[in-house]
Amino acid sequence: MKFFKRFSFRGKIDKSKARKQQFIAQKISRRYCFSAVSLFALQSVVASLGALELVIPDLPSPIPFEYGRAIHLALAVLWPLIGTMGMVYFFTTAELNREIYSPRLARWQYWMVMFFGIGVFSTLALGIGNGREYLEGIPVLYVGICISLVLASYNLVRTLLTDKRNITPAAATMTVGVIFLMLLLLPNTITFSNPITDEATKFWVVHLWEEMAFELTSAGFIATYFIVSGLAPRREVEKWLYLEAVLAVVGGLYGTGHHYYWIGFPAVWLVLGSLVSLVEIIPVGMLVRMTYKGLKSTKIRSNREKLTLWLLLSSVFHHITGASLLGLFLTVPWINLYTHGTYITSGHAHLALFGSLGFAVLAGCYYILSQGSEPTRKGYKGGVLAVILLNSGLIIMSSALLVAGFMETYFWRILGMDFMHVRFILNPYLIIRALGGAIFTLGDLLLSWRIFKAWQATRSYRQPKN
Amino acid sequence: MAPGIFSLTESPAPFKITHYKICRTLLTTVYYYAFGEYYHDIILIALEGSLLKLRSFLLLSILSWILFVAITLISSRLPSPVPEQAEAGKSVWQRNNCVSCHTLFGHGGYAAEDLTHITAKETSAYLVNYLVHPPVMRPNNYTRHPALNEADAENLVNYLEFVHTIPTLGWPPQQEEAEAN
Ligand code: HEM
Ligand code: HEM
Ligand SMILES: [Fe+2]
């Protein structure tokens, strides 16, 4: 079968007999991915309501704006996490060509992260929270998510140690990424009375999850995907991976400085943050180069792979533009002094968080959930349409935010006009943002539906025999 | 070469001129003139760094992480300790999710004014009154600003007064001008 061919290894650990079964870990990873996609669908609905609330006065809403926004942010942080957990298991087994240390732990981990994640959303819906942006849930729920990440780290490390001589760079990079996710969340379960420690540790999730830990896991996924599907030779992919990982870690860590500028930290962070942010760009370039090499080398065979690649390419596009170039622009301290705290940040946040990370996680989730099936022609077209809608919705939404942000910067920060007065001037752009959001939501629901169909078609496809 | 941090590849690849090789030749020449006999070490690090092994990756990650945590904690020292009432105010701020609409230090929602230095603009009596008897928020016709009780409002304003004392390196910009005028 085609499936087995794709997973027969050509490379260093070529001791594969054609397998008669799928790994249990890969089966478990399906539920992570399925949950991630469902939460993503929920997110755009919540977000659209929030966007409407900002432009329609006195709009009645079951959940007040301040908690709705908190749910939107909690979803933005947690669905990529859940998707990533699934992808790490899937691609680690594919890369190492053996089962993970404990499938049972992976199941426990799933239930923990879902329980505490849903706990965050539902307590926020009830108006119970801790009011730290992006981490608005009450701290004890994040302890649960941390434990879930501890289980993941333990499981992955034991998996690697089972065969010490065959620790491949891609598998190691993903494992280190997951360990960092755990380490970075940990301080956020503590309540600090010092407001600026609070502010700083928050960015260990907002910045370091996205720009370091997920960067490591994504590099691992893409490397494995290319190696395993035979799109690029193993040697070519592995050559630079550790260097890329080191740059991502060092650049990511000290690049956090670009969020430390005005929170009461010493001025040395202005220099450190802006210089090291330049280093952050290098691994992005290397990731893009790796992706490009993989794309160039072979003809893409199936519609399934094509759809995965459309999603992946969207991610690469936004990673270069909305995340890296725009991010670098905002990192210049003289610019940031004026743009900080305006809608420009929001434009960058949507382009970067969804554009680069969100699309990458969706690509992986689609790939995993459709394993063993091939979309019908109609299904493929629907998928492509969804990608187009998502991209145009995102670009309309973020451009509107950027324009609003530049006007806000000029009128409020440079001319020093009254804030509320400037807010009224921005209203038309917020309406355009809501329209872009509607297009985005359409694309989101359509893609989730396609992925759901793929999930359904492959549900009974393989039952592990043991 | 012993398996140290960096080691050379011995790859007998067929001869082919690639961009990589051209760059390598150019860089080698530049480095030779710049660093003399040490040029080879530098190239080892720069070009063959791709062979950075797992061990060095882990080592560098752990060291950078520890150093980063340490300097973040050192940097977050406050000019004066948080007074008790301000600490209570901080928890009022968090319980009511004020950050969804307002920013502190420029971080938060965009629906309403930044509050980092609000206590320099308004008196605390005005602020407490605003929170206890909240007005209708423009452009709404009915929706009022969320309300707090007297004690919470006082603690909160105390917290905002404390936040105002934290130096923010000249941000926000128009504030400086306002103070200079
Ligand atoms: C995948 C990559 C990235 C993601 C997911 C991402 C995400 C975000 C998010 C969510 C924020 C908003 C934080 C807030 O609300 O306070 C933000 C702000 C920021 N990002 Fe990024 N970002 C990425 C890449 C970059 C890069 C590569 C740079 C620069 C080299 C950068 C520079 C900045 C700066 C300077 C801000 C602060 C803006 C301000 O508050 O004034 N970002 N980013
Ligand atoms: C239907 C699509 C979406 C709409 C209409 C939308 C709308 C909104 C709204 C209204 C806010 C609050 C802004 C404010 O305080 O004024 C917001 C913030 C935010 N959203 Fe979305 N959103 C959408 C999709 C997404 C997605 C898919 C992600 C990421 C996965 C995301 C990540 C964020 C982030 C990180 C912020 C905080 C930005 C900041 O503080 O700078 N959004 N969004
Ligand atoms: Fe950042």
Image: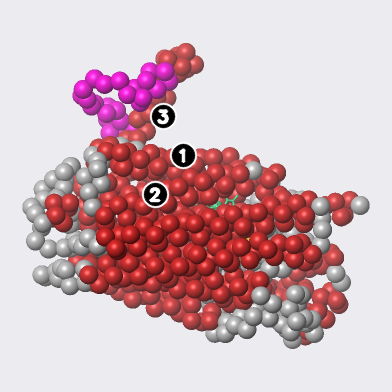
Place of residue A157 in the rendered image (x, y in percent of width and height, measured from the top left): 29, 57
A418 shown above or below A317: below
Residue type at the position of mark 3? Ala
The answer as to whether the residues below labels 3 and 2 share one chain is no
Chain bearing mark 2 = A
Q: Is residue B6 magenta?
A: yes
Place of residue A290 in the rendered image (x, y in percent of width and height, measured from the top left): 35, 41
Place of residue A299 in the rendered image (x, y in percent of width and height, measured from the top left): 24, 43
Instruction: Tell me the residue at 45%/68% (across/down).
Output: A442
Tell me the CA gap for discs 1 and 2: 18 Å
Residue type at the position of mark 2? Leu
Instruction: Tell me the residue at 80%/85% (across/down).
Output: B133
CB under 8 Å between discs 1 and 3 = no
Task: Give the residues in magenta.
Answer: B1-27
Tell me the CA gap for discs 1 and 3: 13 Å
Q: Which quarter of the figure has residue A388?
A: bottom left
Q: Quadrant of the C terminus of chain A?
A: bottom left
Direction from residue B123 to residue B87 in the image, left or right? left
The answer as to whether the residues below labels 1 and 2 share one chain is yes
